[in-house]
Image: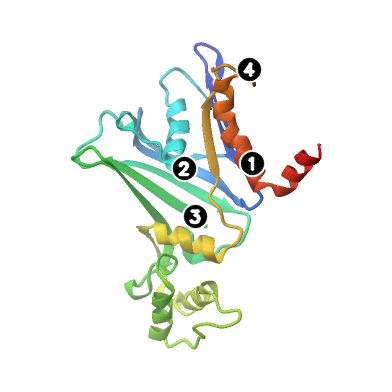
Amino acid sequence: MELYEHNIKFRKVKKLFAIFNENLKLTMKIYDISIINFRGIKSLQNLKAGDVNSFVGKNDSGKSSILKALDAFFNEKFTPNDVFKGIAENEKTEIVIRFESSETINPLALDQEGKIKLKKVFTFSSAGKLVKELFYSCNDINNEQYSNCWGVKEAEINGYLNSLNVEHSRSGRGVTNISKIELIDANTQDLGRVEKEYPGEEFLKNLKKQYEFFEMPDYSLFDAEQDLNIGSTAFQTQFKPIATQSLQNNGEFKHEVRQI
């Protein structure tokens, strides 16, 4: 995925340029973006994204803020200057990204529209220390006794199945958390579903463990108004991490480069 910023007033193109490194394992694409209390953005809801995205607008209309919000989400680059100036005392900065996957993922890990929904919250403590929180939302079982299947450990999954009186194997060939969660899903259909939000650290760990194809995108943001001479330090400083990561994630291409 590529994102560009176009400045109408001064006719500057590519003032900021962002790249998503789509490695071999990556099956997730950004579906939409929501931003609250970030830089000049008070509230931006469900901005749809595609493979190539171009932001066009006047100065200070929020184009750069969207790209920097993505940088905060993926790389956790966040400073006090990124906080919306009119933010209330009880509010925080929130960046929500929904992903869609080309592979099948268990519905209890997805929101009501079948998307992976992650939210990062940023605030500063009274001592000035950055506090970061990660959450996920899912179309969950409407019963607290069997909630948050993708955000708990295996022992709790086994406990859910015991409570439902569902016969299952704790371990063995072909027995995975996915198979257990599928049993829970199938045996709780009568309870209904409701979208809920939970802490997201264990959720991401479980997705990565259960789905080999699952991997979060790499995101790189750089200023294209700097020296574009490929031999300059300013250019190489921005592009070297992108090129290095791409080669690491694509062994076949790296082999071809070596042969050349």
* Rendering coords of residue 207 (x, y %): 51, 61
Label 1 vs label 4: CA separation? 21 Å
Residue 240, located in which quarter of the rendered image? top right
**Alpha carbon distance from label 3 to label 2:** 15 Å
Which comes before the other along the chain, label 1 or label 2? 2
Which residue is at the far front? 258
The residue pinned by badge 1 equals 246
Q: Which residue is mark 4?
A: 229
Residue type at mark 2? Phe
What residue do we see at 53% from left, 39% from top?
219
Work out whether residue 34 or residue 80 is closer to the camera in this orientation and state it: 80
- Foreground label between 4 and 3: 4
Which residue is farthest right? Answer: 260
Task: Give the residue number, with chain letter if any, for mark 3.
Answer: 116
Pick whichever of labels 4 and 3 is earlier in the sequence.
3
- For the C terminus, the quadrant is top right
Q: Secondary structure at mark 1?
A: helix
Q: Amino acid at mark 4?
A: Asn
Q: Callout 2: helix, strand or loop?
A: helix
Q: Which residue is mark 2?
A: 74
